[in-house]
Image: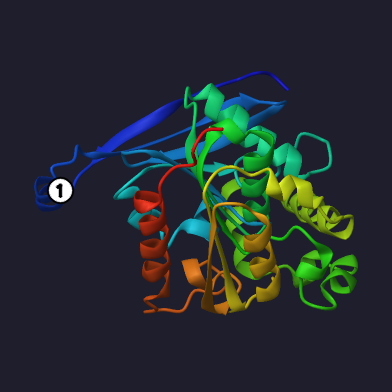
């Protein structure tokens, strides 16, 4: 694959009253592709402030995972949202997906953008990837937020892996399929994305506890009380990861952020979740260097 970089496109938007009240510069939007470890990796940048990287869930795109909270986050931070291998605008590299490789791709993108460190927020598969960024690239992570992350097979509901062995496009959520096809129009690419995510989970192995205890960034660990991730696993993570805080939110997988498959019209929960995250990012002291 050629190391092609699509120059970011940028446009400025501003609500005049809001901008005057906050005395912040006009927010900006840009998007582009960066040569990252054999990928042309798609990214978007929204807003201004300290960098906050968003990492989507499996089978998803930036918008399907974060579309309902991205504007709230971009009002306070420079949001850098990515699409990982085989997802959304980013094509497949021809190799199996792994949380470790996804983490290395995110780190390489930040280096490409000239960002030495950032806050990282991931959901579901993206939450596990966010943990791996903190494990593999500790100096690049200022603070860490992981929603519905998993690091052990017993962290998922009983029967999850039996069901995953038989997963097919027929039972992949329709909104996720529609979002992918709206971007690419490729049914072949949709199958590749599905299979990459399926195989990653079928072959999933427990992470060594030593990896979790090595995380030095302050961490906010979130899950939902009716999540695919059992609440006990998130509690266990909070006990293993130093400098971590824990919150169990009401609802099912993704409802806390208004993910496209579980969004509840009119729910205030996504705004509450953003408030929790913002309070953590803005008021938690950074880790003390050893």
**Quarter of the image where the C terminus is located:** top right
Q: Position of residue 59 (x, y in %)?
A: 68, 57
Quarter residue 141 falls in: top right
Front position in the image: 111 or 133: 133
The residue lying furthest to the top in this view is 3
Q: Position of residue 35 (x, y in %)?
A: 62, 24
Q: Which residue is mark 1?
A: 22
Quarter residue 2 falls in: top right
Q: In the visual, does 132 lie left or right of 162?
A: left
Query: Which residue is at 78% across, 65% downward?
Result: 169
Front position in the image: 122 or 241: 241
**Quarter of the image where the N terminus is located:** top right
The residue lying furthest to the front in this view is 290
**Compared with residue 247, is residue 129 higher up or lower down, i.e. above or below?**
above
Query: Which residue is at 82% across, 78% downward?
Result: 158
Quarter residue 48 falls in: top left
| Mark 1 element type | helix
């Amino acid at each position: 694959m050629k190391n092609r970089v699509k120059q970011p496109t940028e446009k400025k938007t501003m609500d005049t009253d809001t901008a005057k009240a906050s005395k912040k510069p006009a927010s900006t939007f840009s998007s582009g592709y960066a040569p990252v470890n054999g990928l042309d990796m798609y990214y978007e940048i929204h807003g201004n402030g300290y960098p906050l990287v968003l990492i989507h869930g499996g089978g998803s795109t930036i918008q399907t995972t974060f579309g309902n909270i991205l504007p709230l986050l971009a009002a306070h931070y420079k949001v850098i949202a990515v699409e990982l291998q085989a997802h959304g605008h980013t094509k497949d590299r021809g190799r199996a997906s792994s949380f470790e490789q996804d983490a290395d791709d995110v780190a390489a993108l930040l280096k490409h953008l000239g960002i030495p460190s950032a806050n990282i927020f991931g959901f579901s598969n993206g939450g596990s990837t966010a943990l791996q960024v903190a494990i593999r690239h500790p100096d690049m992570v200022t603070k860490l937020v992981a929603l519905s992350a998993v690091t052990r097979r017993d962290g998922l509901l009983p029967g999850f892996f039996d069901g995953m062995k038989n997963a097919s496009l027929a039972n992949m959520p329709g909104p996720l399929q529609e979002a992918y096809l709206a971007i690419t129009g490729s049914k072949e690419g949709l199958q590749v994305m599905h299979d990459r995510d399926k195989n990653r989970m079928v072959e999933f192995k427990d992470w060594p506890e030593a990896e979790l205890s090595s995380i030095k960034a302050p961490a906010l660990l979130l899950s939902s009380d009716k999540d695919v991730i059992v609440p006990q696993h998130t509690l266990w993570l909070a006990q293993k990861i130093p400098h971590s805080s824990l919150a169990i939110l009401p609802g099912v997988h993704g409802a806390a952020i208004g993910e496209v498959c579980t969004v509840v019209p009119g729910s205030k929960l996504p705004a509450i979740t953003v408030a929790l995250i913002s309070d953590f990012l803005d008021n938690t002291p950074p880790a003390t260097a050893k």
